[in-house]
Amino acid sequence: MYSFSYRRDQGGFDWGEFISGILMVVVGLLLLKHPEKGLHAFVLIFGVVSLVQGVAWIAAYFRFKQFFDWSWTAFIPGVLDIIIGILFLVYDDVGGLTLAYLFAVWFLADSIVGIAFSWHLKVFQPGYFIFSLIMNILSLLIAISLIFNPILAALSMIWLVAFWLLVFGVNQIILAWMHR
């Protein structure tokens, strides 16, 4: 069994974790330095993934159409995924704007759900209810500002990914040293 203790018994440095940590830190720093290129890369990745997913859905349709009556439900999202993938690859500005709005709508949906779920705290702890409600209302205001400012939404998305890469990358580097 391959585990933390196994590595310690072997006495080696975890080069894979170290290299992946360095790469994550470098990519995170590059995203912070060039957020517009990061957004362009996200759009390209999303476009390619959408194309591949579309082809997979259509292949599933042809594979299952003889013995599954509802197989046509795979064909429709397959065509839509291919169209979206092509649009993202051809019109990357539209793709960037779409991702920015999706990011903002995601925050909006989470904020609304957070407000709705805050009410159950009122019964248990009124202080937590007020705190949760205030935080979710602030989150809602941020989400609304992101919807009205898609450039801010796009930059926020890039910054969040960049900071995640930095934090996770530093953690990987530390783990590489800890595993020896």
Image: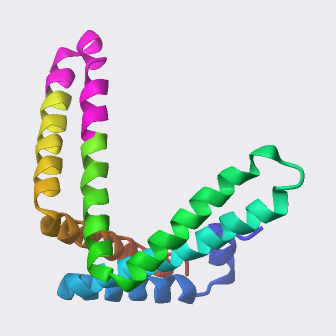
Name the residue: 37% across, 78% down: 43
Left or right, residue 30 beside residue 79: left
Name the residue: 28% across, 19% down: 121
**Image quadrant in which the N terminus is located:** bottom right
Residue 19 vertical position relative to residue 171 in the rendered view, above or below: below
In the image, 105 versus 92, the foreground residue is: 92
Whether residue 11 is visible to the viewer of this picture, yes or no, is yes
- State the residue lying farthest toward the right: 67
Name the residue: 75% across, 52% down: 71
**Image quadrant in which the C terminus is located:** bottom right
Residue 170 vertical position relative to residue 121 in the rendered view, above or below: below
Magenta span: 111-130
Whether residue 14 is visible to the viewer of this picture, yes or no, is no
- State the residue lying farthest toward the top: 123
Left or right, residue 13 beside residue 125: right
Place residue 132 in its image quadrant: top left
Residue 30 vertical position relative to residue 56 in the rendered view, above or below: below
Place residue 35 in its image quadrant: bottom left
Q: How is the image coloured?
A: rainbow
Residue 169 in picture, x, y percent from top left: 39, 77
Residue 157 in picture, x, y percent from top left: 26, 67
